[in-house]
Each structure stands twice: as C-alpha cells, then as structure tokens.
Image (cartoon, rainbow, N blue to C red):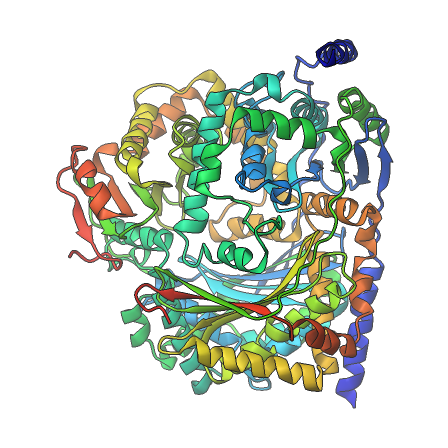
Amino acid sequence: MKKIIICCILIMSATLYSQIDRTKKPEPQATPKLQLPKIQRATLSNGLSLMLVEHHELPVVYAQLVFQTGAAKEEKSGTANLTAQMLKEGTSKRTSLQIADDIEFIGAEISIGSNYDATFASLLTVKEHLNSALEIYSDILLHPTFPEKEWERVKKTHLTGLLQQKDNPRTVANNVYSQSLYGANHPYGRPAEGTETSVNNISLADLQTFYHSNYKPNNATLIIVGDITVKEIVPLWEKYFAQWKKEKVTQPTFSTTPTISSTSIYLIDKPQAAQSEIRIGHIGVARNNEDYFPLVVMNNILGGQFTSRINLNLREAKGYTYGSRSGFSMRKMAGPFTASAAVKTDVTDSSVIEFMKELNAIRNADVTEKELSLAKNSMVRSQPQDFETPQQIAGQLTNLVLYNLPDDYFNTSVQKIEQVTMADVRRVAEKYLNPKAMNIVIVGDKEKIQSGLEKLGYGKVNLLDTEGNSN
Amino acid sequence: MKLLRVAVLFCFLTSLAVSQLKIETEKYTLPNGLQVILHEDRSVPLVSVNVWYHVGSGREKVGKTGFAHLFEHMMFQGSQNVGDDKHFEMVQEAGGDLNGSTTSDRTNYYETIPSQFLEMALWLESDRMGFLLPAMTQEKLDNQRDVVKNERRQRYENQPYGRAFERIFALAYKAEHPYNWATIGSMEDLSAASMEDVKEFFQFYYAPNNASLVVAGDFNKKQTKEWIEKYFGSLPKGKEVSKPTTNQPTLENDVRDSMEDRVQLPRLYMVWHSTPLSGKDDAALDILANVIAGGKNSRLYKTLVYEKQIAQDVSAFQYSRELAGLFFVTVTAKPGVTLSELEKIVNEEIQKIQNEGITKRELERAKNSISTSFIYALQSIDEKADRINNYNIFWNDPNYINKDNERYTKVEAKNVQNVAKEYLTKGKVIFSVVPMEKKN
C-alpha cells in the first residue's frame, strides 16, 4: 500500500516537472560591457608616480607602494623580507608597540613584504581614518629606526619560524625544488625568507643598507584604489611624504643557472608521511615572454584549472589526490614551471607516471577544439572577477608597473587570448615544456616509495635533506 | 588630553562607517519552503548564487562521521540534466568561480559568474537540488571517497598539528554530542559510506524546505524571480527537518591529554566551554579573545611573545557554533621552553583580566578592529552573499547583516571582565602536541 502511494507521488511530481525543459542548458544573456577601471596618473613633487582608480562602492581606501626591487637583489637571503618586517618595529616617534596600537586602534591594516622581484607596502583603511592612517604609514616608511632590541627578537622569531618550516612538507618541497633548478647561488634558487645560515649572517646594518638603497620614490609607484579622487589624495600625500627624496637605485644582476640534461628524481625522506608532495618541472619563462598568451592558454588546458587534464586525471579519474595542478611562475626573469600535487603514499610512483604522461601528451598531439574553447572562454569571461575589489584592481595595476605593460593592456588582452590557435598551443608546449629534462622532487616516506620510484626509468633516486643537500 | 579627544573621535567615526552601511535585501519563501533572498549590487557585471543547506556534520550519526562533507563532494559530480563532471566545466567555461564547504552546522555551495550566465547558474543549482540521485553511481562515490581521504591526509594527517582539533573535540564533547567529531570524519567511517546513505541523506536534508538561496550582484529582479520560480518552484517539498536545539555542555573538572606529532615545537591548547552563536555573551567573548591575543599589544602576545620571548605565537578565539561554543587559547613554545611554564602565565594573565578588568583603549581597539574587518569583508560579492545566508540561517533574518555590529558596540569593559569570570573559571580541556618521543 505504502509503495502505491509513493508511486502516485512520483507520477504527480513527474508531471509537474515536465512543464519545463531542464535538459537544455540555458543560453547566456547579452554580454554586459565591463567598465574597465579608468587609470588616472599624476606625478608627485618628489618624482613619485601615482596611478589612481576611483572605486566608490564602500568607504574604503587601499594604497600600495610598489618598489621595483625585492629579494632577487639581496646578497644574504632573507634580507629584503627582514627589512620589511623591521620597518614596523620602531620609528623616530613611535615604539614597536605604539605602531601596532595606533594601526589597530583605527582598524587599519598595513603590511610590508617582498617577493623576488618587488617590495610592497600596502595600507587598507576606512576613509574616515585616511588622514591618521597615512600619517602612521609615512612614519613607518620614512622614519624607521631599526632598534637593536627589536631586531634581536625579530631575528629569533624568524629563525624559529624557519625551524618550524621543516615540519611542513609543502614548504620543504617548494624550497628544495627551486634550489634544484637554480642552484643556491641564483636568487630564485634561495627561499626569500632566507635559511638558518643566511639569517644568522644578516646584521642590522645589512637591513639598513637594503632600506636606504631601495625604499626610494624613484624606485616606486604609488597605486591607490578606493573611495577617493586624485584631487583629494595629492595634497594629503604631499603633506606626509614631503621629506622623501630621490636617490640612485641599482637593479639586481642574475648569475647563470645550471642546465638540466636529463630527468631525475630527488627524494627528501619524511618517515611515516601520510602523503608524498610532488614537484615536477624546469625553469620556465619570464613575464615579458612574447608567447605569454599562448602559454597561459596552454597551461590552462594542462593544469591551470579544476577541469584541466592533470586534475581530471589524478583527482577525478584516479582519486590519487585532493588536487593537482601546473603553472608558470612568471617573474622579471624566468621563474619555474611546476606541476604539483600531494598524493597518497602508495600511488607516488603511479602519480609521477600520470604527470609525465600529461606533460608529454600536450606536446605530442593537438589539444581538442573543445578544450581550446573552454580555456579561452574561461579566461576571457573571468575578466570582471579581476576588477571587483580595490585590492584586486590594485593587483592588476601592479602587473602593469612591474612588467612594463601599457595602460591599455586590459583592453587588448581579451583579443589576444581569442587569437590563440590550436597550433599556437602545440608550438608553445613543444617549445617551453621538456619532459626529458625535468627535476622531479618528492617529499615522502622513503621506505615505502623509493623502490617504486627507481623502477620508473629516471635512474637512481637522489636522496636530499630538507635543505636540499645530498646525504 | 588631546590624545583622549582623538580617541573618542575615532571610535565615533568607526561606528559611523558601519552604521551608514545599508545592505538592502528582499526575502521571500516559495510554496515548497525554499527561502530566497535577493541583494542587488550593480558595481561589477558579476552575480553570486549562494545556496545553504541547513545540515552539516552535526547531523551525522556515530559510525557515519564525515558523511555530510563527503556528500558535498557528490554534489559536484553531475545531476540528471547536467552530466558527469559538467558542473565544474560549465561554470568555468562561463568564466566563473565555484566551490562548496561543510561545517558542523551547514553546507554551502556557490558560483560567482559574469551576470549574463545567471540563468545557467540557477539551472545548475536547481538540477542538483532536485535531480542528483538519477545521476549517482557507485563508481562516483568510490572516486570521491578516495579524494576525500586524500583531503584528510593533506589537511589533517600530513599537516603539523593537523590532528589536534579532532582530539580536542573528542575530549570536550561526550560521544553522543554531534560536535564530538571533526567535519572531515574518520577514515573507517568514510570507508563505510554507502549509496544507501547518499540517497537517504539527500532525500531528507537536501529538500528545498531545508535550503536558502541568495542571489547577490548585478541582475534584473523581475527576470530573476521568474527564473527562480521556473527552476526551483516545481521541486517537491521534503519532510519537515527539525531545527537543531542548542546543547551547551560544561566540564566539571579539567581534562588533560597530549599527543605526539612530527613537529619541532610543542603547542599548548587551553579550551573552555563557552556559548553558542546565539548566546548573549558571544560578542563579549569575541572581544575578550581580541584583548587576550589579537595583535602585538594584546595581553598574551605582549607578555609571552614580545617581552619574555618564550612563545613563538599565540592565538585566542571564541569558536561559537549553532549548538555550542568553545573558547580557545593556543600557545606555541619557543625551543627549550616547557608548556607548564606557558600554562602558568596564561592562567596569570587571564586572572588579571578577571580581577582587574580591561582598559577603555583595549575595548575600543577590539571594537574598531572587528567593525572595520567586517566592512573589508563586504568588498567581495561572494563573501557578501555568503554572509547574508549566514544571517538568514542562523538568525532567521538576512537583514541582520546590518545590525550585527550593534552586538559589539553595546559591549562594555565590565561585560568583558564578567565573561572572563563566568566562562574561563570552569573546567577546561588542556591539550598538548609534543614532538615525537618527547611526551611531557
């Protein structure tokens, strides 16, 4: 009886459902025009150039100074990073604790940090507090005193942090992988946070030198996005940054990188690890590469998004991992190309096989029409997402500043993506991916994975410690 | 004197910024019980479709832990009219972002897409709300079970200190309390999940009457209401799902335990039972957490990290959930420092607050940090949509997004001292993670 009732209900609801056709995916409406942010420019009295985008949705202002030099310029790795940390540790009129108190009291956020190519000093504040926030921000940037007492603490904390990184297989894999590609003498081969040895060698004088030779208005661009106009910001800025003067700034030089002649495996033992962290690849390309657009389309198909080949294979078909991907880290100079995943220990060798299969496949045959249009549509249509919040807009402008892209870059990029052909994708895969000369770096349980890895045909597995030294 | 006036001016201005904030929402309920909330924001041609199902790991049964989250994965595997693996593909081809997440109390799904694809997003969400089961297979379940086990390995087992929270939950809550286990569940229970479980869970908890749909961003209201009616209106109402009732336990006495992990530094967790999200002291406890460990001038950071330099990091937070809350204080020792030394100082600092209270400046600094970070979070449309759903599900009022800050502005220094006395004097869990072979 009960069954019959259920049947009736099912039939009734089936009738109801049939009133609309759910089998067809709804077509999109007309594409609305994305109003690309209007970039306004000005030059301040000390030569600092300003780029401003008005964004009046919320009473929030985001400011970012982008300096053209970062960790790639340091002699002892960790110098740029620690210099940035020390700016908030004391000024001529505020102690370390006062700086933190004043910032938090108005609910502002100030962060200063460096990557290889650049140093960023950013300020996020509600508009009512812009005046006070800029006063603190300028105090930190122009009048740091690098107190000895704070340096001892910061250094100790930083060294302990580096010690803790040994616990994290992801960080170990990333650092050893970079070092294996570039060597410890090239800045991209060293961690920007430094190592125990390098940080122990850094003195307060090193930080002061780095500060005085890089934090200059002629080495920087000021990007401002938010509920503000050029007319409002210029007098405020001039008031707080009047004393900031130009000085000569040198750009870093890069030593040569080792060449990889054949693909080999490097293993860092982590006994009883639940997973293996895998990194595969070689040195990639610089951001100003002429094939930028074909390369990002190619990588999008290979491992750049959820539905890319690498993830659909290793995660969705095989269930080896929670997620796998590939990407080019494009910098002022050629950064690494990396395919990566954390995989279950007992499928470590099988995962390497699948990665290599995909890295070869994208060179050996054309991608399909469908893959190409999926990648291109996805990239073109996601453009509005890059310009939603003040921080995102500032991030886009930062790319213009760091890689010398023209102001109309965002207007032309859509067209350039659309122009990428199947032949382009094949050509750049062949040209920029070389599975015969890649480093495969794995952090995992040696006892369980070494013998499987030695059967893959890449020769003997090279054992390294967490610092990347042979053992 | 001048300083004082500036301070007063500051807090007045900050609350002004938040009080000026007005997020307009329109809420209505379809005959099948689906709650719908619309919020227009035309600043960028983007729209966020955000669906909350009022179910999480807190509804799981003993022996079936981790199921709500495993089920969330199944929702991305295609439904009757969408096709295997097509859900991701369609959203990505539209240039959108998508994801889902599971907590103990709710499961959310969202896509943020260019506005011309809104109808498609509503079709996608309605198809899996109504027609997931016809597309479900044992093979898909087995595959996602492997993916989720890898998620557990990556985020808990192979993560330094990654298993501490599930141990603490098990110590704080009795076996029959739904917060006794972590959302990720156990490997054994994940292995045991069956197709029958998938069907039952879907039919009971994924009905429109247990869900809330937010559309936020750039859309035409009239057209959108028609689409919502078209795609969701005909989905049948499910059984009544009873609202969970709060269940705030307490501990008579302190409970101590520890575990070994592959870490360099020992870490101490001190955890008190506090109040659920709806508790009257929730906001005061948030402020107390900020005073204890939010920023360089907070009590514990200043003492342990800045002055004595015996801790590498400290944190404190009021972890309030729908049924119950816990107040956490966490400290990581510097090399060579014992956890008992840290525990003693944590106790002393908390006693100071209990005996002497907090300063005006501490109170205002905490309030200002909380209110501005609230504004900063509202910059992105998907965060705004998710918060609207949060207020709708847990406060039964999407418009509470405009009022929540009042809970904090009303808190006085005395209240913060009182909650420190009321909650941080009772029985607690004292848990430590120590480096292998150094159990102490």
User: Residue at the front extreme?
Assistant: A1
Q: Position of residue B363 (x, y in %)?
A: 73, 76
Of residues A280 and A19, the one drawn nearer to the viewer in this rendering = A19
**Residue A210, relative to residue B324: is it above or below?**
below
The residue depicted at 70 percent of the width and 38 percent of the height is B52
The residue depicted at 69 percent of the width and 14 percent of the height is A22
The reply, left or right, for residue B149 in relation to residue B15 is left
Q: Residue A415's quadrant in the figure?
A: top right
Q: Quadrant of the N terminus of chain A?
A: top right
Q: Residue A198's quadrant in the figure?
A: bottom left
Of residues A228 and A405, the one drawn nearer to the viewer in this rendering = A228
Of residues A419 and A148, the one drawn nearer to the viewer in this rendering = A148
Q: Residue A237's quadrant in the figure?
A: bottom right
Q: Position of residue B210 (x, y in %)?
A: 74, 34
User: Residue at the bottom extreme?
Assistant: B1
> Does residue B218 appear in the picture of this structure?
yes
Q: Quadrant of the C terminus of chain A?
A: bottom left
**Residue B91, relative to residue B153: is it above or below?**
above
Count of marks placed on residues: 0
> Does residue B93 appear in the picture of this structure?
no
